[in-house]
């Protein structure tokens, strides 16, 4: 495949996943955290044994040493410290799995992209205003500070000196971190890059900060039934590499980014998946799993996905495995969109998937493996589709 760039034609370079790392609080962990909040950190992934674990100096500072009124209050600082800890663990796991944490490996050419959503939406902004009440910092500035601190800390902690960027957008920021990293590799501007995302703020974050919880929880209960929500909080990172750096692996292929109209979403989404398969040359019968996620409880995402799958099934003889983790209020879109790539990698390499899984066996009973279609829809009706392919050299 060719790419036209600055008036010249060049060949695209393939980008593949060589490692991943996830630090998450999902599903049932939420119930246990509510009962044992002091043990919440036990759910973070273990730090790689091949490198020194984070110390207090690897965080942004001791809470007692900072003026809580100058920039961040104590609760905001706790949140930022937690994001740093989770992101460093996730990034460390991804680098470790890819083989880049040994002392003999040069990590200076590895880049880093961190995606994190921007909370311009009304419901999101209201939650942040609770956190930053009577403080000088703007609530919408907190994600900006967090993603910049996380990106910088990862580079410092692991000695990454390549291209570094934090991405903040009102739509699919985590998926964009994957796409941006892939574009850099395809254009041969970089050979190795760590891409990922962290969640900005969730009901779980508010719940764990009792100072806020005690004062404002009763006021929130009338708006959102917190006990019924299943929020998520975490960091997810993948190591993307050029095919020139080593052998074969799980490759990230063609991608499509666009926007849906709020009317007839099921029909539109089905048409988009069909169009994507036609443009990419992917045969639906070859797809072994569809990874999909949505960043808002207001979207009928399960219905959309199943409508699309059922429509396509009328033309093909099988329905692939479906993996569809979901979150509320769009607060974890960066993390979950990146987690979909991890999910695809897990399925192709380790023959298993993380997240909630539903099975639809094919009529022929074939054990298919080779392609995974990754689908992501955010709260502003923006979507990203790409597919991952396993190639063994």
Image: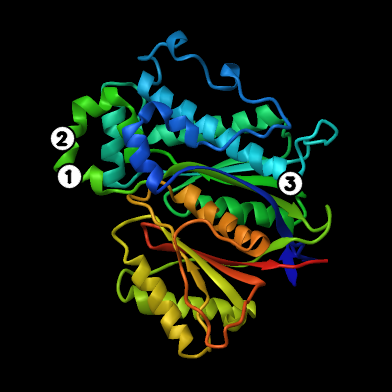
Q: Is residue 218 above or below residue 232?
A: above
Dot 3 crowding, Cα within 10 Å, few <14, some 14–19, many 20+: some
Where in the figure is residue 311, as x and y percent of width and height? Answer: 43, 84
* Residue topped by disc 1: 223
User: How many angstroms separate mark 3 from mark 2 (CA)?
Assistant: 47 Å
* Residue topped by disc 2: 219
Dot 2 crowding, Cα within 10 Å, few <14, some 14–19, many 20+: few
* Residue topped by disc 3: 98
257 vs 208, nearest the viewer: 208
Where in the figure is residue 144, as x and y percent of width and height? Answer: 47, 35
34 vs 95, nearest the viewer: 34
Dot 1 crowding, Cα within 10 Å, few <14, some 14–19, many 20+: few
185 vs 195, nearest the viewer: 195
**Left or right relative to 132: residue 287:** right
Quadrant location, the N terminus: bottom right
Where in the figure is residue 41, as x and y percent of width and height? Answer: 47, 31
**Left or right relative to 30: residue 191:** right
**Left or right relative to 54: residue 3:** right
Residue 127 visible in the snapshot: yes
Q: Is residue 370 above or below residue 171?
A: below
Tell me, yes or no, whether the two marked residues, 1 and 2, touch with CB atoms within 8 Å. yes
Judged by depth in the image, the label closer to the viewer, 3 or 2, is 3
Secondary structure beneath dot 1 equals: loop
Which image quadrant is residue 159 in?
top right
Secondary structure beneath dot 2 equals: helix
Disc 3 or 2, which lies upstream in sequence? 3
**Left or right relative to 209: residue 46:** right
């Amino acid at each position: 495949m060719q790419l036209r760039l600055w008036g010249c034609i060049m060949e695209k370079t393939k980008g593949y996943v060589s490692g991943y790392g996830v630090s998450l609080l999902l599903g049932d962990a939420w119930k246990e955290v509510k009962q044992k909040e002091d043990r919440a950190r036990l759910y973070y992934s273990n730090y790689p044994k091949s490198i020194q674990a984070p110390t207090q100096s690897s965080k942004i500072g001791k809470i007692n040493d900072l003026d809580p009124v100058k920039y961040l209050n104590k609760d905001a600082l706790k949140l930022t410290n937690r994001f740093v800890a989770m992101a460093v663990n996730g990034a460390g796991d991804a680098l470790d799995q890819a083989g880049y944490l040994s002392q003999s490996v040069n990590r200076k050419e590895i880049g880093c992209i961190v995606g994190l959503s921007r909370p311009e939406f009304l419901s999101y902004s209201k939650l942040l205003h609770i956190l930053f009440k009577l403080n000088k910092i703007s609530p919408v500035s907190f994600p900006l500070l967090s993603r910049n601190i996380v990106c910088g800390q990862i580079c410092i902690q692991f000695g990454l000196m390549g291209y570094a960027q934090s991405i903040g957008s009102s739509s699919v920021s985590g998926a964009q971190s994957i796409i941006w990293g892939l574009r850099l590799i395809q254009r041969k501007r970089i050979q190795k890059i760590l891409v990922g995302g962290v969640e900005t703020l969730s009901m779980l974050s508010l719940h764990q900060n009792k100072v806020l919880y005690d004062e404002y929880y009763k006021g929130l209960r009338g708006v959102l039934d917190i006990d019924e929500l299943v929020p998520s909080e975490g960091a997810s990172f993948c190591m993307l590499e050029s095919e020139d750096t080593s052998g074969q692996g799980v490759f990230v292929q063609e991608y499509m980014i666009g926007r849906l109209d709020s009317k007839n979403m099921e029909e539109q989404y089905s048409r988009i998946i069909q169009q994507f398969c036609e443009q990419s040359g992917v045969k639906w019968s070859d797809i072994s799993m569809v990874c999909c996620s949505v960043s808002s409880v207001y979207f009928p995402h399960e219905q959309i996905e199943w409508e699309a799958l059922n429509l396509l099934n009328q033309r093909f003889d099988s329905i692939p495995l479906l993996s569809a983790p979901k979150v509320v209020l769009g607060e974890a879109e960066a993390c979950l969109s990146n987690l979909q790539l991890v999910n695809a990698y897990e399925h192709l390499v380790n023959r298993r998937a993380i997240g909630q899984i539903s099975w639809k066996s094919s009529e022929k009973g074939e054990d298919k493996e080779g392609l995974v279609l990754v689908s992501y829809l955010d709260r502003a009706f923006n979507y990203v589709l790409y597919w991952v392919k396993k190639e063994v050299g």
